[in-house]
Image: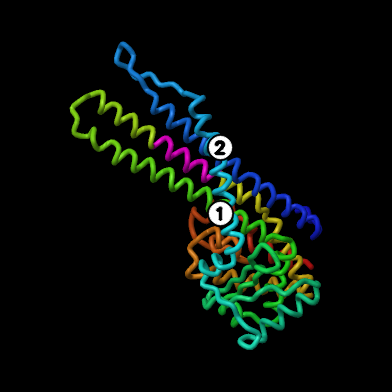
Amino acid sequence: MRYVGMYTQIRRNNMLTIMLLLMFPVIILGMIWVFLALVNYFGNGVYDQYGNIVRHLDTATVNYYFVNAIPWVIIGVGVWFAIAYFSNTAMVRAATGARPVTRKENPRIYNIVENLCIACNMDMPKINIVDDPQLNAFASGIDKKSYTVTLTTGIINYLNDDELAGVIGHELTHIRNHDTRLLITSIIFVGIVSTIMSIVVQMMYNAFWFGGMSHRSSDNEEDNRGNGLSMIAVFIIAALCCAVAYLFTLLTRFAISRKREYMADAGGAELCGNPLALASALRKISGDPGLENVKRDDIAQLFIIHPQHFAPGLTSFFSSLFSTHPDTRKRIEILEQF
């Protein structure tokens, strides 16, 4: 594995964030053009002299509707990102059940975070706690106002101060390297694609069932044939949308390099001054990772250890192939070499 410096990682993450932001409208517009083309192609069938349906693609019509859709797509993506930008902290907090914690409520955690921030000369982030016995922690936010370190009550109660310092140092390194900005951007991206996919599939489903109901009682063979072709078109468009959304999800996962976890481990070990303490913390967390109420995989990407790594069976194997986290045992081995 080739190691890179912190500033190199920051530049890479900034570039990836910009690329993802530019990709969103392009990808969505591409999906819309394909959708319009398929609808146009299957909707332009005419019968020839032998009674066979002849279909053709009217690109001029497709391009006309596509050009009219461009400003609406740009506005929609812009509004979506504006909402996410101003409410990403509330969204993550709602998905995890996190709550803010005060210095008076938990001076131990506040002192550890504050000392580590002083050591690396960074502004102190917000601190949240999740009332959950499982062991995990994560960082979130896209700017200084929203940067947050979240810990479960389980990890606070189970780890000693040195181990907690290693875990918190790991999360602070994510913030310093702008990993959290990239992760939140990717979560928004997946949300946009998934929402559009769901809307398109639902529209086509409704169009088939409610638009085709009037032909169900018809004995006309041509009408029945047309309904059959419409069903095929619906399934093709739905399958295409699902495939496109899945592909983009994979691309987003690959864009978030596993190296960021190794970088955060190295940064956390440097900040706490005790690599073995962080290795011990990872070993303990791996025994009971995750958050009981968090079912969304995009949110689980933020965790210091992804719960799917410890799910039994074939699902775990395939998940690990596209995981944003490296193997925990490998991370521990590297830390123990320092």
The residue that appears at 48% across and 63% down in the rendered structure is: 295
**Identity, as a three-letter code, of the amino acid under mark 1:** Trp
Q: Tell me residue 48's x, y (percent).
A: 34, 14
Q: Secondary structure at mark 1?
A: helix
Mark drawn on residue 80: 1
Q: Name the residue rendered at 53%, 53% in the picture.
A: 191
Q: Nearer the viewer, mark 2 or mark 1?
A: 1
Q: Is residue 104 left or right of residue 308?
A: right
Q: Say what secondary structure mark 2 lies in.
A: helix
Q: Is residue 83 above or below residue 77?
A: below
For disc 2, the neighbor class at 10 Å (few under 14, some 14 to 19, many from 20) is few
| Tag shown at residue 30 | 2
* Amino acid beneath label 2: Gly
Going by the picture, which residue comes out furthest to the bottom? Answer: 104
**Residue pictured at 72% horizontal, 75% vertical:** 124
> Cβ–Cβ below 8 Å for labels 2 and 1?
no
The stretch in magenta equals 235-247
For this rendering, which residue is in front, 63 or 203?
63
Q: Earlier in the sequence, mark 2 or mark 1?
A: 2
